[in-house]
Image (tube, rainbow, N blue to C red):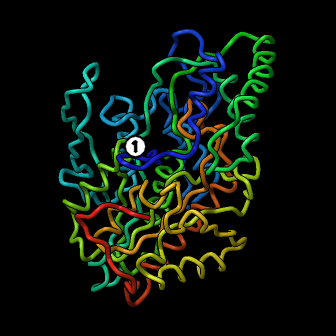
Amino acid sequence: MTPLHRSLRLHVAPLFLAFAAAGVLAGCAQQGTSTRAGSPAASAGGGARPAYSAGITETDLRTRLFIFADDSMEGRAVGTPGHDRALAYITAELTRLEITPKGEQGYEQRVPIERRVPGDASKRDTIWSRNLIAVIEGSDPVLKNEYVAVGAHSDHVGIARRPVDHDSVRAFNRAAWEATGRDANSRGPTAAQRSAIRVNVDSLRALRAPRLDSINNGADDDGSGSMALLEIAEAFATSATKPRRSILLVWHTGEEVGLNGSEWFMDHPTVPREQIVAQVNIDMIGRGSAKDVAGGGDNYLTVLGPKRLSSQLDQWVRDVNQRQPRPFALDYQFDADGHPQQFYCRSDHYHYARYGVPIAFFFTSIHEDYHQVTDEPQYIEYPKYARVTQYLYDLTTFVANQPQRPVVDQPKPDPAGRCRQ
């Protein structure tokens, strides 16, 4: 998920600055810690193709995420070779599954991204990245011309400027997160709390040498969404019964630098824009336990946006949840008008909503590893991750099978306007 950008102000304290001030920066290496001996990513590196199940499984999600958030992807910063490798993995899987490409050239849609020139903030240039777009054709001869879109973002924030001691960072951020009540709205620990945490971290560091890490692997943000989307794609592709409407699968690029990929796609859609009946956005769905979030747990899941355009879609979100073997406790707190976090404006669904497409955005909230080198696949809650993914597959199927598209009964925003939660 992108930080608050443009004129919006971030209310979560930047804990990286806190641990930097606490003196836990060290060394000058770029190694990370996500590839473990015997991990799926390590095995894949030997040339063996992992075996995947047709349905949505915890094992598949774990295997995929250890590959996608591996150190070899170098944090998937937009336009980098590491991001290209991550996109190549998704493309290879879509090809293997024989899912129909829906980009401008195969699965790809080129996206221009303006950026500051490294070393000269006064100048800007344009780099090119790619959305990946595919479609599962619907089974109804008429409704297959309409689309339920499901999306995630493939990029992350890349390599940190300076390497840090992975374990010290995680210990400091965990303690700081606890000190602020595991609250995404907190402004961070007090100076006294930071001092006390520093003493404890220093004592831990005295016990062993640092393990240097500078790769922001982005396992939860948004490796979890990207690989859930790939599992959902596989489940639809291998199912004998296809939903009535077509399923539009979009891995957006550039979310972390300003929602570029989703903005470009909706301004230059590869299917008729008016035929997209709804969009399900998946961003950070791999955490949300009680130790991550105040009020979190196995059933915690945050929802934003469905009622902003369609009270009917909001009701479908609730109805499909209640039909799950273990329904989630859906948390709408961040969807409140004027919420300081402005999450509604901070992920790719917004660019669908600005054109009047009803959306539902799912995530499991901010945690202490958000935008840190410690956002790694070994910290994901895989049983819950699999349950959330299955629920989103079921919701997508339900929407795709309805005789009518969700009714838009709320005012549509101005497509050229500015997002306001």
Task: Compare residues 222 and 109 and report the one nearer the observer.
Answer: 222
Decide if residue 191 is on the left or right side of residue 95.
right
Residue 261: x %, y % from top left:
30, 50
Residue at 49% in and 57% down: 343
Where residue 410 sits, quadrant-wise, is bottom left
Residue at 65% in and 79% down: 323
Residue 90 appears anywhere in the view: no
Residue at 25% in and 21% down: 120
Q: Quadrant of the C terminus?
A: bottom left
Task: Compare residues 5 and 362 and report the one nearer the observer.
Answer: 5
Q: For label 1, count other residues whose C-alpha is less than 10 Å away and answer few (under 14), some (14-19) or many (20+).
A: many
Residue of label 1: 256
Residue at 52% in and 12% down: 29
Residue 110: x %, y % from top left:
21, 46
Residue 195: x %, y % from top left:
74, 24
Decide if residue 170 is on the left or right side of residue 342.
right
Q: Going by the picture, which residue comes out furthest to the bottom?
A: 403
